[in-house]
Image (cartoon, rainbow, N blue to C red):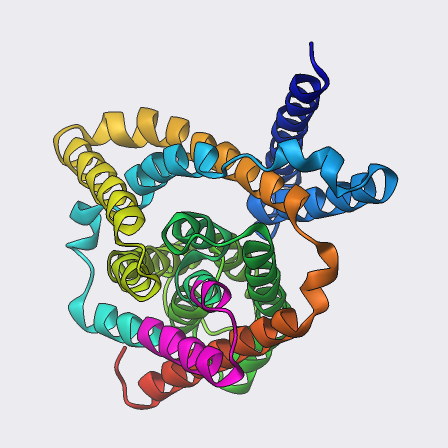
């Protein structure tokens, strides 16, 4: 075996091992905040930095495989699971409209601030998607459309994750107590604003200080239903970012795959709900989780850890924070106006 083939085999093996490790940590911990994509990214950055210091960046160049190898198949399973048009058709229109407003404000604020701060467009769009839709999963799905580099993805995801952790452990409990929210309102709050699906689950897992307007189980279902509504934003954001980046071909393919897989899942759910719920979902979720964990591992291995705290990294953090607080403000306005 040639040295190049050996290095490539080493790189692929490393990506797979890191991806499995990130997903395994998620399973073992059972924690909503242990997002396997984020864990795999951070492990990849750490291991890549160690390897670079020992042998130089050029010796891990074979790791620079196309992340589309992992991301594109993951999109099929992700959309099959999450873009269920049949379920979404039953959502309450008034509440859905307010969630869409929260999403629109998230994106508008981050994009406007990115323009003002002269941030890289790729980082701006990835940060906006990760904040408004679904954290690491949305960033992974949007990466092929904006053609973001490993550094772009790492900077965006770390910024979104930092703000999400701060919101989960500090901002949300504080505001929930300050405004005397009921568990129903808190469910709407977390589902509409928190970035990661796992964070929404973690936020709803232990809220003893809130008034119980509905049962705890119903509050969790409400939060997750609202979070699922945000997936629809990708149907508008992918074309928008593809047009802005002038990557029409890549955008079209990603969007087609995303929509077709969602329609297929919706049809199967409509015709064979037991098969969809009891068999296909349990199989599909681990598949896209593992594929995207490997994609993030590859991205992390090729990222430059030093760039996380550079000018672009700081700007991404400011943008993610601004979008987060703007979304919170929209929610609080909706509560005052009795929108939900």
Residue 48's x, y, as percent? 74, 42
Q: Is 115 contained in the magenta span?
A: yes
Q: As displayed, is residue 298 above or below residue 283?
A: below
Examine the rendering and report whether any part of residue 39 can be seen: no
Residue found 59% across the figure and 69% down from its top: 163
Image quadrant in which you'd find residue 181: bottom left
Magenta residues? 103-125
Residue 27's x, y, as percent? 60, 35
269 on left or right of 114: left
47 on left or right of 322: right
Q: Principal SS element in the magenta part? A: helix
Image quadrant in which you'd find residue 171: bottom right
Examine the rendering and report whether any part of residue 131 can be seen: yes
Residue found 17% across the figure and 28% down from its top: 272
Q: As displayed, is residue 221 above or below residue 60?
A: below
* Quarter of the image that includes the C terminus: bottom left
Q: Nearer the viewer, residue 32 or 39?
A: 39
Q: Nearer the viewer, residue 277 or 140?
A: 140
Residue 190's x, y, as percent? 45, 67
Residue found 24% across the figure and 71% down from its top: 95
22 on left or right of 127: right
Q: As displayed, is residue 77 above or below residue 39?
A: above
């Amino acid at each position: 075996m040639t040295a190049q083939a050996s290095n490539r085999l080493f790189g692929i093996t490393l990506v797979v091992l890191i991806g499995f490790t990130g997903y395994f940590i998620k399973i073992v911990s059972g924690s909503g905040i242990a997002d396997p994509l984020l864990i795999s990214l951070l492990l990849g950055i750490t291991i890549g930095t160690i390897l670079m210091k020992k042998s130089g960046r050029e010796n891990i160049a074979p790791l620079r495989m196309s992340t589309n190898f992992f991301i594109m198949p993951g999109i099929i399973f992700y959309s099959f699971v999450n873009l269920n048009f049949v379920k979404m058709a039953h959502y309450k229109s008034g509440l859905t409209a307010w969630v869409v407003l929260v999403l629109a404000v998230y994106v508008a604020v981050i994009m406007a601030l990115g323009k003002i701060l002269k941030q890289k467009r790729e980082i701006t769009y990835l940060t906006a998607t990760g904040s408004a839709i679904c954290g690491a999963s949305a960033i992974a799905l949007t990466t092929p459309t904006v053609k973001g580099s490993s550094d772009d993805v790492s900077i965006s995801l770390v910024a979104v994750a930092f703000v999400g952790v701060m919101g989960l452990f500090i901002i949300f409990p504080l505001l929930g107590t300050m405004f005397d929210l009921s568990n129903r309102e808190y469910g709407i709050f977390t589902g509409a604003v928190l970035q990661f699906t796992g964070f929404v689950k973690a936020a709803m897992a232990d809220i003893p200080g809130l008034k119980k307007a509905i049962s705890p189980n119903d509050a969790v279902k409400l939060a997750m239903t609202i979070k699922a509504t945000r997936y629809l934003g990708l149907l508008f954001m992918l074309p928008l970012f593809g047009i802005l980046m002038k990557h029409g071909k890549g955008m079209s393919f990603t969007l087609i795959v995303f929509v077709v897989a969602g329609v297929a899942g919706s049809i199967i759910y409509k015709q064979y709900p037991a098969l969809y719920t009891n068999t296909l979902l349990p199989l599909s979720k681990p598949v896209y989780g593992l594929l995207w964990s490997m994609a993030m591992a590859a991205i992390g291995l090729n990222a430059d850890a030093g760039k996380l705290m550079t000018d672009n990294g700081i700007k991404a953090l400011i943008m993610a924070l601004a979008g987060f607080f703007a979304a919170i403000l929209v929610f609080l306005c909706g509560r005052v106006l009795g929108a939900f």
